[in-house]
Image (cartoon, rainbow, N blue to C red):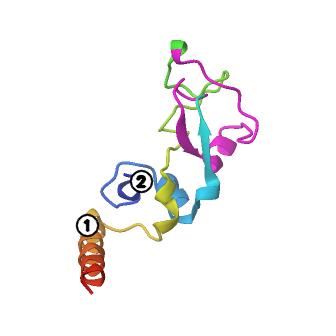
Amino acid sequence: GTAFIATEEARASDAYKQAIVEGTSDDIVYSSLFTGVHGNYLAPSIVNAGMDPANLPEGDVKTMSFSGGDGSKAKAWKDIWGSGQGIGAISEVSSAGVFIEKLKREYQEARQRLAL
């Protein structure tokens, strides 16, 4: 899913798309603070919201909210950006069609290698 955020058609901000392109798995923070449920978030967006990604308190599922947590005005997914572990494979913002064609090509190439 993360790769589709970095497509021209996605309604994510240009800054979010660029953070995905520039990011690596080292930029992913696993936290429950932002919604009450654990998820993966991009450290640069946490820093931009004025928080330290290395020192986040735990969230509480009983108080599930999509605000930024801990009194922050930031909102999960709008300001605090989610990301999957495959972020390192994303190298550019492209159209969804170009990305899908790349997936199809890579799938076919992998099938051919396995058939040898």
Q: Residues within 10 Å of mark 1 (few under 14, many from 20)?
A: few
Left or right: 36 as drawn, with respect to 49: left
In the rendered image, the vertical position of residue 47 relative to residue 95, given as above or below: above
* SS assignment at label 2: helix
Question: Of the numbered discs in the image, which one, if any, rests on residue 6?
Answer: none
Which segment did they paint magenta? 33-61
Left or right: 99 as drawn, with respect to 75: left
Comes first in the chain, label 1 or label 2: 2
Q: Is residue 80 magenta?
A: no
Residue type, numbered disc 1:
Ile
In the rendered image, which residue does mark 2 sit on? 2
Q: Quadrant of the C terminus?
A: bottom left
Measured as percent of width and height from the top left, residue 93 is found at 41, 66
Tell me which residue sits at (42%, 53%) in the image. 2
Question: Of the numbered discs in the image, which one, if any, rests on residue 100?
Answer: 1
Instruction: Report the magenta stretch's main SS.
Output: loop
Q: Residues within 10 Å of mark 2 (few under 14, many from 20)?
A: some
3D distance between C-alphas at marks 1 and 2: 13 Å
In the rendered image, the vertical position of residue 71 relative to residue 54, given as above or below: above
Residue type, numbered disc 2:
Thr
Measured as percent of width and height from the top left, residue 71 is found at 66, 21
Left or right: 110 as drawn, with respect to 76: left
Q: Is residue 46 magenta?
A: yes
